[in-house]
Image (cartoon, rainbow, N blue to C red):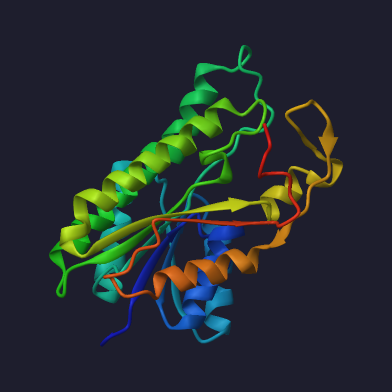
């Protein structure tokens, strides 16, 4: 293992998580990808190894404290430490009418996007404090909705606003322990999820108009994750926004 750095990526089976995991592996990180479904994790790990990366998959539900603890134990047992957590796992609830929103859907979104992120950050920080040398970096996946909501998105928007508070609190509470915490807010990365949601038909705008929005290659997000992950621990990127330049974000609402 030597001086090899180790990254844990949640939601690493598809989309932004997969792209980030593969980019980190290409950079020289040993990578642990986590997610609820085994098959996508196996595919991510296989793709990583094709590029001579060292990458393993661990099935875990970020909402389950026992799963989260087992995830970080596996990372330490396999690679010796945890240097970076890309706290990426999350769910969306598109076009959710506020008055018709069920408590079950609300809780499912908050449990994954906020509580899951808290549990994973807690698990990572415990290992980062114990290891030698101590310290590490957490990159929380926020969203441009963390500052500016889309219409009909209360659960998702509320969860991502809360992630911003979590990011600031972790950054403050652990900066003296050589743990840096920052957040990436992504706007319109083209992934399997956005394709499944058929964004080609358009996205609702604040004025009710349906508009086909500009998208960016997910590899641009992965490059940004690598940039942050490879910074020395005396440097923190507290917040960074990566978005399609032509998307209607600045000034929306």
Quarter holding residue 169: top left
Is 25 positioned to the left or the right of 200 in the image?
A: left
Residue, far top: 99
Inspect this view and state whether residue 45 appears. no
Inspect this view and state whether residue 213 appears. yes
Residue, far front: 251
In this rendering, the answer to whether 232 lies above or below 148 is below
Frontmost residue, 91 versus 141: 141
Question: Looking at the image, which residue is at 27% across and 66% down?
Answer: 136
In this rendering, the answer to whether 88 lies above or below 169 is below
Frontmost residue, 169 versus 219: 169
Quarter holding residue 110: top left
Instruction: Tell me residue 74's x, y (percent).
Output: 30, 64
Instruction: Tell me residue 116's x, y (percent).
Output: 39, 42
Frontmost residue, 198 versus 51: 198
Instruction: Tell me residue 178's x, y (percent).
Output: 20, 65
In this rendering, the answer to whether 90 lies above or below 17 is above
Instruction: Tell me residue 200's x, y (percent).
Output: 84, 47
Question: Looking at the image, which residue is at 16% across and 59% down?
Answer: 176
Quarter holding residue 154: top right
């Amino acid at each position: 293992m030597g001086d090899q750095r180790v990254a844990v990526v949640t939601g690493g089976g598809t989309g932004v998580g997969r792209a980030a995991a593969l980019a980190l592996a290409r950079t020289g990180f040993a990578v642990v990808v986590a997610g609820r479904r085994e098959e996508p994790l196996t595919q991510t790990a296989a793709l990583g190894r094709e590029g001579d990366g060292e990458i393993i998959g661990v099935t875990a539900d970020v909402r389950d404290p026992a799963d989260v603890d087992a995830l970080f134990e596996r990372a330490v047992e396999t690679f010796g430490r945890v240097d970076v957590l890309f706290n990426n796992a999350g769910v969306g609830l598109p076009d959710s009418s506020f008055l018709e929103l069920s408590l079950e859907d609300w809780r499912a979104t908050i449990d994954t996007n906020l509580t899951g992120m808290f549990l994973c950050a807690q698990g990572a920080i415990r290992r980062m404090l114990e290891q030698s040398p101590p310290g590490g970096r957490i990159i929380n996946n926020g969203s441009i909705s963390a500052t500016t909501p889309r219409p009909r998105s209360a659960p998702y928007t509320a969860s991502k606003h809360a992630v911003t508070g979590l990011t600031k609190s972790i950054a403050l509470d652990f900066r003296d322990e050589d743990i840096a915490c920052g957040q990436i807010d992504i706007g319109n990365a083209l992934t399997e999820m956005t394709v499944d949601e058929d964004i080609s038909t358009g996205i609702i705008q604040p004025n009710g108009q349906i508009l086909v929005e500009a998208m960016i290659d997910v590899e641009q997000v992965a490059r940004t994750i690598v940039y942050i992950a490879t910074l020395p621990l005396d440097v923190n990127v507290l917040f960074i926004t990566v978005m399609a330049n032509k998307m209607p974000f600045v000034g929306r609402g």
